[in-house]
Structures are given as C-alpha cells and as structure tokens.
Amino acid sequence: MSGDNSETIAFPYQHHVVVDKLPRSEMGWKKRNISRVRLIAWHRCNVAEDPKDIAQWFIDNKKWVGHPYHFQINLDSHGEAIVYQTALLVERTAGLFGWNNRGIHIMIHGDFRYQQPERKLFHAAACLAADLRGFNIGDRCGGHSEASYWLPKKYWTKKSCPGKSFYTEACRRIVSRLLIGNETGLTVLPVGESWWQTR
Ligand SMILES: [Zn+2]
C-alpha cells in the first residue's frame, strides 16, 4: 500500500463535449437568452445509444434540427457514467414543449417507465444538475412529465418521461444535498467551474 498516497477523487462522471461532432440540419437551433433559464429537466430516450445515432434518429424521424437535449448520460462498457454535451446551452432545442426557452435538458439513456436507472446513471443525473447551479437554477429540477404540469394545461404531456421508476423526487433531494455540501460519496464541480460550452 505504500508509495501510493494519492487520493482518487471520485468524480461521478466522465464528460465530453461532442456538440460539433453530431449530425444536425443546416438551419441549426434558434438561440435563446441563457439568463432566462429556470429549470433542469430530466428525460429518457433509448432510440439509440451513441449521441450521433440519437441526433440522426431525430433528424430522420421528427425532422428536427438534431439532438434535442443539451446533455446525454450513458453508462460506458465498465458501468461508469459518461456525460456528453450534445447541444450548446444557448440553443433552444426541442426537449420539452413550453420549457425550451427556459430549460436545460438532460437525457438519460434508457426507459424508466418500468425499470429503475442504474445507480451511477441516477447519481450522474443529480451531480450534473448540481454542477449547473451557476445558472441560478438551484434545485429547480424535474422530470419532463412533471415539469409539463408546472405550466398551463395546453403544455401538459401524456408522455411518461423519464418514467415512474426514475424517482425525480429522490434525485431532486440528492441535488439539494449536493448544493448545501451535505451529500456524502458524491462530488460536484467547484463553484464557478465548468466543462461544458455555453455558446
Ligand atoms: Zn422527455
């Protein structure tokens, strides 16, 4: 055991900015005023696994510009969480009708209607939300479906997203504890630091 006194900081996820590597239509997403962002929304998606294939699926099947979420979380082949940034934060993507001007969209790979997310996926979803606190969102995080009900009725969705087995209440509690430095075993970025691209 001697000779190795370096302590591994258990950063909860690997991260990569892949915005420029994804297919997208020429027109691009409209830009928005990032200071108006008020919500982090969690989503499910399993039409594909690779962010490139997910972007292409939405182009082909929805005729959308490209990847409709700002972040995508997967597990890698070792079961570790990996977060991709898939759209710039100034881009008004199509993640959630009614919240696209004011929401940051986090897609979690999988289908959580009947199956709970792996622990590391769940924790990465909470840690990423806490890392984004610089946007003054605090713990205003919610699942796609529940966030739609925070809006007038015309925005309500029938879609079950991220699904009832993704416990948004519990995820929000982890975010709250991370924000007050009261969560053990998980770490977040120091205040003011970021790895993602805003514009
Ligand atoms: Zn959704």
Image (tube, grey):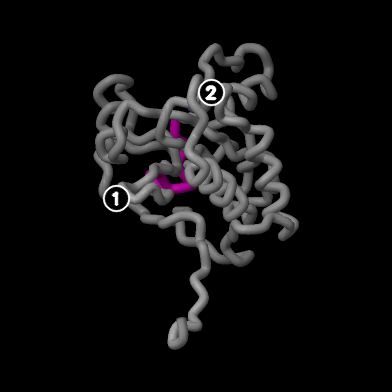
Q: Quadrant of residue 56?
A: top left
Q: Quadrant of residue 166?
A: top right
- Classify residue 11 as left or right of residue 47: right
Image x and y of residue 94, in percent:
45, 29
- Dot 2: element: loop
Q: Quadrant of residue 154?
A: top right
The residue indicated by pointer 1 is 20
Magenta region includes residue 100: no
The residue indicated by pointer 2 is 163
Residue 53 vertical placement versus 192 (above, below): above
Residue range highlighted in magenta: 85-94
The answer to whether marks 1 and 2 mark residues whose Cβ atoms lie closer than 8 Å is no
Image x and y of residue 70, in percent:
45, 42
- Classify residue 194 as left or right of residue 68: right
Q: Residue furthest front?
A: 1
**Principal secondary structure, stretch drawn in magenta:** loop
Magenta region includes residue 88: yes
Q: Is mark 2 within 8 Å of ligand 1?
A: no
